Image (cartoon, coloured by chain):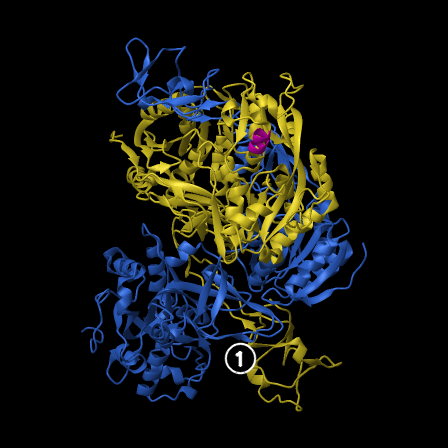
Chain colours: A blue, B yellow
Amino acid sequence: MQRRLYLDTAPIPEALQRLRETLDRDALLPPETVPTDRALGRVLARAVFARYSSPTFHSAAMDGIAVRAADTFTAREGAPLRLEPDAGFVSVNTGNPLPGGRDAVIMAEHVVMGADGSASIESPAFPWQHVRRIGEDIVATELLLPQGRRLAAYDLAALLSAGIWEVEVAGSPRMAVIPTGDEVLDYTARPVPGPGQVVESNSVMLVSMARAEGFHAERRPPVPDNPDALEAAAKAALDEGFHVVILGAGSSAGTKDYTRSVMERLGAVLVHGVAAMPGKPSLLGVADSGALLAGAPGYPVSAAVCMEKLILPLCAWLERRAAAERPRVPVRLARRVPSKPGMEEYVRLAVGRVGDDYVGLPLGRGAGMITTLTRAQAVAALPLASEGAEAGQILDAELYVPREELDATLVVVGSHDNTIDLLADALMGLPRPVRLASSHVGSMGGITAVASGQALCAGTHLFDPDSGDFNVPFLKKHAPDQDLVLINLAVRHQGLIVAKGNPKGIAGVADLARPDLRFANRQRGAGTRILLDWHLKTAGIAPGKVRGYDKEEFTHMAVAVNVLTGTADCGLGIFAAAKALDLGFVPLARERYDLLLPRAALDDPRVRALLGVIADPAFQERVRGLGGYETGLTGREMQPGMGLGE
Amino acid sequence: MQRRLYLDTAPIPEALQRLRETLDRDALLPPETVPTDRALGRVLARAVFARYSSPTFHSAAMDGIAVRAADTFTAREGAPLRLEPDAGFVSVNTGNPLPGGRDAVIMAEHVVMGADGSASIESPAFPWQHVRRIGEDIVATELLLPQGRRLAAYDLAALLSAGIWEVEVAGSPRMAVIPTGDEVLDYTARPVPGPGQVVESNSVMLVSMARAEGFHAERRPPVPDNPDALEAAAKAALDEGFHVVILGAGSSAGTKDYTRSVMERLGAVLVHGVAAMPGKPSLLGVADSGALLAGAPGYPVSAAVCMEKLILPLCAWLERRAAAERPRVPVRLARRVPSKPGMEEYVRLAVGRVGDDYVGLPLGRGAGMITTLTRAQAVAALPLASEGAEAGQILDAELYVPREELDATLVVVGSHDNTIDLLADALMGLPRPVRLASSHVGSMGGITAVASGQALCAGTHLFDPDSGDFNVPFLKKHAPDQDLVLINLAVRHQGLIVAKGNPKGIAGVADLARPDLRFANRQRGAGTRILLDWHLKTAGIAPGKVRGYDKEEFTHMAVAVNVLTGTADCGLGIFAAAKALDLGFVPLARERYDLLLPRAALDDPRVRALLGVIADPAFQERVRGLGGYETGLTGREMQPGMGLGE
């Protein structure tokens, strides 16, 4: 094989074009003959012409009597015509061949059978009425299906009806996925990851993505970071006749380099990186055997992009089928997202319907965040030349979920709380499930999103030190003149999350100034942060005195993980987070966690479902079961000055 | 089981509701535990909470050096800070755990390594830069996925990353399809159907429809019309644990009655017919074992509707997944279609883009016509109360093909010709395939459709006896002032199709008046019909003298089949049709078969592709290979008065 220069960090269309020019698909995947009943989803390699006609005979299309139409012309209402069996008529059921010489069927409902076996009719039959004529559906020798047709269920029936027992179809690429890396653990061994180790799961994602499109794909066991071992594994897959061999990088950079050199040993690398984020470190090449070689990046989101935008379109092209495309919808972007010119960037979105629009909240953009894929309902591409997309801009987003599911999705923004997870689960258990997508932007972010029409529902727990009230004063200030409703979800306990057994003897806010303590804080705008600031102020402690005050986490759980791993000695958070990780908890305050909604949204079926779940005693019991929650106000509309309701 | 009254000819939603009320899905399909890597497409029976965090450790997000951010604050451009190995920095690759005490990573590109092993930087690092923090993606104990989630490829990777090796999922219904009927032939025996026999193919369609949705489905061998045999076959499937047993009616009415009585022996029939056309004779019931019983009608289109509208939605409900829905597009109806009030009617459509609209031409509505399913790009439902839909009305049509494929579909209306089939096949062989959908409405119908903007392309071969020209005079009359183009596809030979060896010695038109001859005619408006009428007139024969003049067929092939089977002794048609069925042919005339297009359509990429194929000598050779075609004018724009170009 001629060694070609790399395409370096190529735009995806150029990368695909380079591979299409180089791969010899006729040699790699010659047509094959398969039995028709096993050909679902396969692509016809050549036109199919019918061998049999269908029907192969004139047949009755109704139950009734077969007649010669000309014999019946004198029948009139009130002047019935009497027909004798055999000579005048023959009884037929639907599907029966038409007896010789008959050219019409009269429905049984329009015939009066006499006791003597005769039949009487009161209207004439016209020729060929209720008769399925020979070749009506399929005429032998005519074109049944053209080449390039991807065979659907209906097509298989038509082929069999026409006497086509087997079909010549394009070969379908078989794919092997080989995970690599010294640090990856084979999930089949059910491992417990230690420091520096990760459970290998990209291979299952890649194999499943291929299977979801109807391709054959197999996962191989992980191979350590050793070029010889890697080459041997890839060569074994090529020798077994796989048409596409994917080397999945581990999480270490060393692996990536081996992938390239191993690909060069086996053939040629044609594309070295693509102009896409995530997905940039993708590699594409061709083995000397003619097979497609690919190196998938180690981060899961990058690997998914590599599969979806490069490998699967090439597999579709190899099989001569149209590349699968997701349905698209226009999505209004809730927040600005920046983008690097020269890179196509994929932004995953939590999408829900707000009024007549679909509104998309950008999810985290880290390529290592698999949950941005599981949480997203859609993904939008920001083109190469783009410097980003503005809030309010309409993006043409590809859907990860059926559009019907999108209409049943409610996006909850604002502050995160574990009860939101319980709510999400309970809503999915309804006869008409409601999908709850959440985007954690803090309480103030939530108020802004609801007030600006970007979301229908936000979780908020903002404490106003001046009035001693929750949320209402902030609405007056940031969303005046809007008809918004606050429904209490729970009253929860905030406190200091500390290590198990509280080894540092932390008793309260006053201790936060201790020089031996490292604190884990929440992000600006979070209700918990506001609560902390009030407690610090009350205690007369300047934020600068708190070590770790600048270390921001975005969820209670993340704060708790800092304490669990010793990165911090304490952090302000909810009891549920401490309990979930089996940590200590020093109660500080109770606070109201409310859901904020436009009043007009109370009629929305998704919101009605949500309020129904909140009002359900079984749900409230589950909330209390988390620990650190009270449900005395749960489901009630909150009024100004209610505070904690006492 | 309590025997309930039938719902007789029920609207589909009521039929589904009756079954949902009666089936005990918890008992029929209890949740089951499956390995995560085998759970693609399965529905979670309960919420899954993470066991492991991801990452489980702080790790480098870039290749470079790990540092303590606080150590770097003095670094400035032009005033590099020198860091010593170990004490000041540790080299890391992406994915490596962050060495103890380090809280930031500086990218390799921003570090100058000294020969002595030291590292120099010119800007400070901020805390946690380029660090993937523990739990950044997944926090142990938090909700990973809610109940009811249908697992996608991404979800499987998230589950494995979080240490979830197996998942509890809703049971998935397994389906058995049992074809029945004395007249059906098992296709696995590769039968040759005799009179009254049909190759059984519905079962493969039904099984494949279920598989395309991800359900397990198996076909059983056909069972003759014998209630005991039928009951035994169904009982065997129930005993083997199938959750859904479908009895597929043969083409005879007797079978249907057995289906009902067999269903009653095994349990109860709940729905006896639905208010839908096709699909009316569908039966639904529940076996004493709790399984879903269904009786699918014998006609293929009815069986497909039964599967798609009744059985598959119930299977989706049994598995607690959202019922699959096809994408929908608005389609402008090209012709009026009547509908019977009280019945929901499904109209299959050949759909192509014309300008900014999708235009749908109704295909044949016979429930026995499997090719209306293979030819259709979409189906539209006319509601229960409807009396039909008018030409020009916008219907909300469900797509059988991807929307992208629709944009690549060109609808050709008008007169049928076998070269159109060759054209359809050749267009699918292009690198960017164009799908040709055809609707046979005769030459006049084609001119009307193009002139009224319902189609971009029509095949027409209308002979004008007064001028001796083809097509042009008809355009002047029926589409004046429109800028239309005629491109010749071929000059073809029309003649009398007669039995092999011409046993009746038919020599020409004059013989058509012979009382011993039966003729097969084409439909009114067809170019062939006009040609016949001119020949009859020239020969001085009144149409009433021709036996069979009133017997109308819609294609050349159908005329030829009449001759093949002895239903007629001759008919006017093209040589290709006679040759395809190995019949005799008495030449009468040559005629021009042109494609009619709006001139503006010549820029359409589909039309350009079509003209490219027509101009290709290989295509023209294939046309001549059919016999009875000349290609001297092929691909040329026809002008008034050109006639046959001689």
* Position of A598 relative to A111 (above/below): below
Question: Which residue is tagged 1?
Answer: B127
Residue at 63%, 81% (x, y): give it.
B88
Q: Quadrant of residue B471?
A: top right
> Between A551 and B5, which is closer to the camera in this rendering?
B5
Quarter containing the N terminus of chain B: top left
> Between A272 and B82, which is closer to the camera in this rendering?
A272
Residues in magenta?
A: B532-538
User: Residue A579 location in percent, x, y?
Assistant: 36, 65
Tell me, yes or no, if residue A213 can be seen here: no
User: Residue B456 location in percent, x, y?
Assistant: 55, 51
**Majority secondary structure of the magenta segment?**
helix
What crowding class fits label 1: few (fewer than 14 Cα within 10 Å), some (14-19), or many (20 or more)? some
Element on which disc 1 rests:
loop
Seen in the image, is B159 located left or right of residue B65?
A: left
Q: Quadrant of residue A179?
A: bottom right
Verify whether residue B537 appears in magenta: yes
